């Protein structure tokens, strides 16, 4: 039996599908309020629980051979940074300890490339130097602290944890959608007339899911593995989206310093109006000043990880968003 947290989400539901495809029995941790569209009609055993309630986790981990802790509060803007820290840091520590108490043989913890160093003019890897001071915004900060907490469990309590660091997954079933998914929707809908000079490492969500299973099967406890794909500038990403939709790609490049006042206004309006999330954030603009380029060579060499071209990931994302009426 395998337990997956975050199974109703984008990456988590892809992990569930990959586990089911190879014949595993899968249990999923869900909250009563969870949107379960991503796991509808899947042969899984749902167990209601909350990462912030240790007592609710015992039934979820009981009898499990492995745990995939994919759940995280992934937003680039929040009104309550403390709640994000509790979910990402304390939640990770709690589920890992519950799994250890239940005798789980191996835990795959889903971190993020957001906690890794950036190599100016090149591709960063698992060993690129970084510090907490390099983390921009509560999401990156909380994930950095969460990985620190997980590492402490490995070194101090012999936790059987393998860490994976996905880059920027795109593809089908991004129901929320994620910040990158929102960008794809806006571009595919013709609502992105300009862009900034930045870059991302794009990976197909199903390849990232495959990487989780490879880490479970072959990863070394205490090691981290970047699950990335292809490094692309935002201009290249937008050109691929345009190719899929038949629209012209935006040609106007806007300096970062011109976007910052817009982000400030957007955040202020969201706070005053009670909206969920601004369409552009101050932290997002700050992050965009650096190209988030990474190398997945370690995962390829040691795990057999084999990501497909980013063009295929973007095509699948655009097709899925179109089929589910996100582009109207």
Image (tube, rainbow, N blue to C red):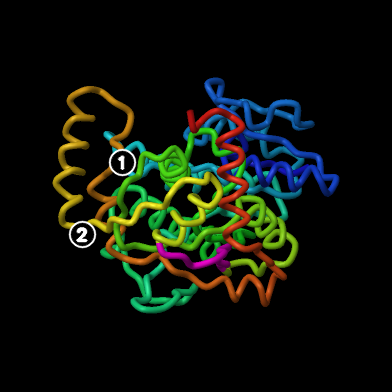
What residue is at 73 percent from the left and 42 percent from the top? 17
Q: Name the spot of residue 35 as percent of width and height, x first.
A: 56, 25
Q: Name the spot of residue 16 as percent of width and height, x first.
A: 70, 42
Whole-angstrom CA distance, mark 2 to mark 1, is: 22 Å
Q: Name the spot of residue 244 as percent of width and height, x first.
A: 56, 48
One can see residue 257 in this view? yes
Q: Name the spot of residue 270 as percent of width and height, x first.
A: 23, 30
Residue interval drawn in magenta: 224-233
Q: Residues within 10 Å of mark 2 (few under 14, many from 20)?
A: few
Residue 226 included in the magenta stretch of the image:
yes
Q: Residues within 10 Å of mark 1 (few under 14, many from 20)?
A: many
Q: Which residue is mark 1?
A: 77
What residue is at 49 percent from the left and 55 percent from the top? 168
Badge 1 element: loop
Give the left or right position of residue 286, taking residue 161 as reference. left
| Pick the front one: 325 or 164 | 325
One can see residue 90 in this view? no
Disc on res. 255: 2
What residue is at 75 percent from the left and 26 percent from the top? 41
What residue is at 54 percent from the left and 66 percent from the top? 230
| Pick the front one: 151 or 326 | 326
Badge 2 element: loop
| Pick the front one: 246 or 323 | 246
Give the left or right position of residue 29, taking residue 91 as reference. right
Q: Is residue 31 above or below residue 186?
A: above
Which one is earlier in the sequence, the residue at label 2 or at label 1? 1
Q: Is residue 159 above or below residue 270?
A: below
């Amino acid at each position: 039996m395998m337990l997956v947290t975050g199974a109703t989400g984008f990456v988590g539901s892809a992990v569930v599908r990959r586990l089911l495809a190879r014949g595993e029995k899968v249990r999923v941790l869900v909250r009563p309020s969870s949107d379960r569209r991503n796991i509808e009609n899947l042969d899984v055993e749902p167990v209601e629980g909350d990462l912030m309630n240790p007592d609710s986790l015992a039934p979820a981990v009981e009898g499990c051979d492995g745990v995939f802790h994919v759940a995280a509060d992934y937003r680039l803007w929040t009104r309550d940074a403390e709640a994000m820290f509790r979910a990402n840091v304390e939640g990770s520590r709690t589920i890992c300890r519950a799994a250890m108490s239940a005798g789980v043989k191996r835990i795959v913890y889903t971190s993020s490339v957001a906690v890794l160093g950036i190599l100016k003019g090149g591709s960063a890897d698992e060993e690129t130097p970084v510090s907490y001071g390099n983390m921009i915004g509560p999401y990156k900060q909380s994930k950095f602290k969460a990985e620190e907490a997980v590492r402490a469990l490995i070194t101090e309590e012999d936790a059987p944890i393998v860490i994976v660091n996905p880059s920027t997954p795109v593809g089908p079933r991004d129901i929320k959608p994620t910040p990158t998914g929102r960008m794809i929707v806006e571009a595919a809908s013709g609502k992105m007339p300009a862009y900034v000079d930045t870059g991302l490492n794009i990976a197909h969500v199903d390849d990232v899911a495959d990487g989780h299973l490879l880490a479970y099967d072959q990863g070394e406890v205490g090691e981290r593995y970047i699950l990335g794909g292809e490094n692309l500038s935002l201009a290249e990403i937008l050109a691929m989206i345009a190719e899929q939709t038949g629209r012209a790609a935006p040609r106007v490049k806007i300096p970062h310093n011109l976007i910052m006042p817009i982000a400030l206004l957007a955040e202020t309006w969201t706070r005053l109006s009670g909206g969920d999330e601004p369409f552009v954030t101050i932290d997002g603009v700050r992050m965009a000043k650096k190209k988030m380029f990474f190398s997945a060579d370690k995962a390829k060499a040691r795990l057999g990880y084999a990501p497909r071209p980013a063009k295929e990931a973007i095509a699948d994302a655009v097709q899925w968003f179109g089929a589910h009426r996100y582009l109207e």
